[in-house]
Image: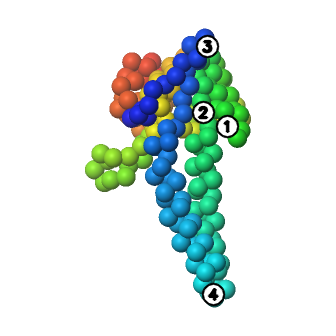
Amino acid sequence: MSGAGEVQFGDGGVSRHVYPSSAMVGDYLRAAAGLVPCGILLLATPVAEEAVVVLGGFAAVFGLFGARTLLRHGTRFEMSDSELRAIGARRTVIRWDGLDRIKLAYYSTRRDRRSGWMQLELRAGPARVKLDSRIEGFADVVERAAEAAAERGLELTDAPAANLEALNVRRIREGMQG
């Protein structure tokens, strides 16, 4: 479930992970599909005050989704043996030796669970990073996070453990409690 592009390696074995444009197009289109019609209706047509509130609310929701998509697309992640750095509008560092929470969730888009995406959430103290399976090298980040979690003795519930197995991270899961 990793992204379609190549993971770049920099100095000292640091891998760089980004969301490819092709993976983000759908989110940009969804944001525009909601924001543009609401904006056109608000600007071009006289509407009742109640409709302004409703359309303005929808426009705000789609605008926030578009802004969140833009922030995600502009964030790159650098992973080394000692940490994961998120570099974008905000800089966040997850030190592997300080990892205190790992959550790997699968979100299905169909009842048969054949289509969907995974989301990895990592915490180390107050630092928190979330990334999803559209990012390049997702499985590599999950594997390193699972190694760090195993080293720290963090527990996984059945669902994240099954998701690790779906990404072929069995050998690490066996070292974790669950």
Q: Name the one closer to the observer, 23 or 123.
A: 23
CA gap, disc 2 to disc 3? 16 Å
**Residue appearing at x 63%, y 87% in the figure:** 46
Q: Amino acid at mark 2?
A: Arg
The tag on residue 11 is 3
* Image coordinates for residue 95, horizontal then vertical, percent: 65, 23
Mark with earlier residue (4, 2): 4
Mark with earlier residue (4, 3): 3
Q: Amino acid at mark 1?
A: Gly
112 left or right, relative to 167: left
- For disc 1, the marked residue is 88
Judged from this view, the residue extending furthest toward the front is: 44
Q: Would you call the spot at circle 4 few (<14 residues within 10 Å), some (14-19), or many (20 or more)?
A: few
Q: Name the one closer to the observer, 171 or 76.
A: 76
Mark with earlier residue (1, 4): 4
Color theme of the render: rainbow
CA gap, disc 3 to disc 1? 20 Å
Quarter of image, res 169: top left
Q: Are marks 4 and 2 in contact (CB under 8 Å)?
A: no
Q: From where the camera sits, is residue 136 visible?
A: yes
Q: Amino acid at mark 4?
A: Pro
Mark with earlier residue (3, 1): 3
* Image coordinates for residue 160, horizontal then vertical, percent: 44, 35
Q: Name the one closer to the observer, 118 or 65.
A: 65
45 vs 87: above or below:
below
